[in-house]
Image: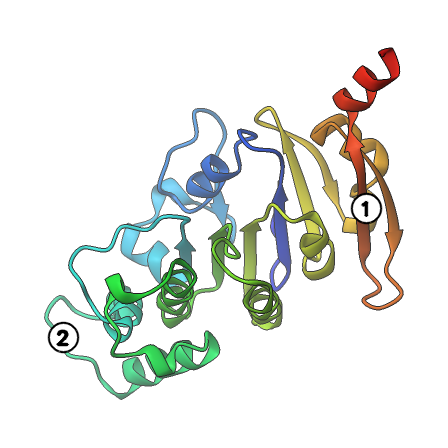
Amino acid sequence: MEAHAGQVLGILGPNGAGKTSLLRILAGLRRPETGAVTLSGRDLRGMRRRIVARRLAIVEQSPEVHGDITVQETAALGRTPHRGTFAALDREHRAAIERALSLTGMSPYRSRTWRSLSGGEQQRAQLARALAQNPEVLVLDEPTNHLDIRYQLDVLALVASLDMTVITALHDLNLAARFCDRIVVLHGGHVRASGAPADVLTPELLRSVYDVDAVVATSPYTGSQVATYLGAVADRAVRAAD
């Protein structure tokens, strides 16, 4: 699979398909058993971790946060790859942090501590940390988890507007069809299909990968594909047998 510069690549698939494992491999947090991951043509295994962190940021589903730090301190962690070990935050670092907090809507929460945040607010704080890195590539594992509908739309519209390559795992196929330039569908640890959403998200694929019968049509409001789920394939087979 390949992520094209400046595009949003959606990673789809049922639970257990391998989405999180793939993202961790792409981010260099886990070594592939076979094959290689390249960043601008360079093998990730031959690059220093600090150099990779200047170019690639990842937001995982359940990030570990040590200590009850504030939202602003969380965002400031994104500047770590760009600073010396004991270097203070200069004007450039502070500007990057402020921009990240503003983009994610977390500026009003800057003084809030991590444990006082809801799950959705923690997710947005971690996105602010990643954006403060000013990466070329942004890897997101279910960025809409814990978010209500408004913030799901806000976050995906934001990442789609960024001047960077975005690779994101998503569960909601309709959101993926709307905001992703290309999608890759995983099934059983393998790439089952890849391409433009309109070419990949077909009733046949949803039936074979997700075990659901669906109708897929183009929305007159967004211009993207929308799947309407009719029922589980297994349930329909049982009812027919009865």
Label 2 element class: loop
Structural crowding at the residue carrying mark 1, measured as other residues with C-alpha within 10 Å and reported as few (<14), some (14–19) or many (≥20): few
Decide which of 185, 81 is in the foreground and name it.
185
Q: Quadrant of the C terminus?
A: top right
Position above or below: 162 against 234: below
Circle 1 is placed at which residue position?
228
Instruction: Determine which quarter of the picture holds residue 8.
Output: bottom right
Q: Can you tell which of label 1 and label 2 is closer to the viewer?
A: 1
Q: Are marks 1 and 2 in contact (CB under 8 Å)?
A: no
Q: Position of residue 186 (x, y in %)?
A: 63, 33
On the picture, is 38 further left or further right than 91?
right
Q: Local crowd at mark 2 within 10 Å, few (<14), some, or many (≥20)?
A: few
Figure check: 204 above or below 121: above
For the point 25% across and 79% down, the residue is 111
Question: Observer-nearest residue: 228 or 14?
Answer: 228
The quarter of the displayed image where residue 210 is located: top right
Q: Which mark is residue 87?
A: 2
| Residue 10 drawn at (x, y percent) | 63, 50
Q: Going 67% across and 38% down the picture, which residue do you hit?
A: 185
Q: Position of residue 198 (x, y in %)?
A: 83, 50
- The three-letter amino acid code for the residue at tag 2 is Ala
Report the Cα–Cα distance between label 1 and label 2: 53 Å
Three-letter code for the amino acid on which mark 1 is drawn: Thr
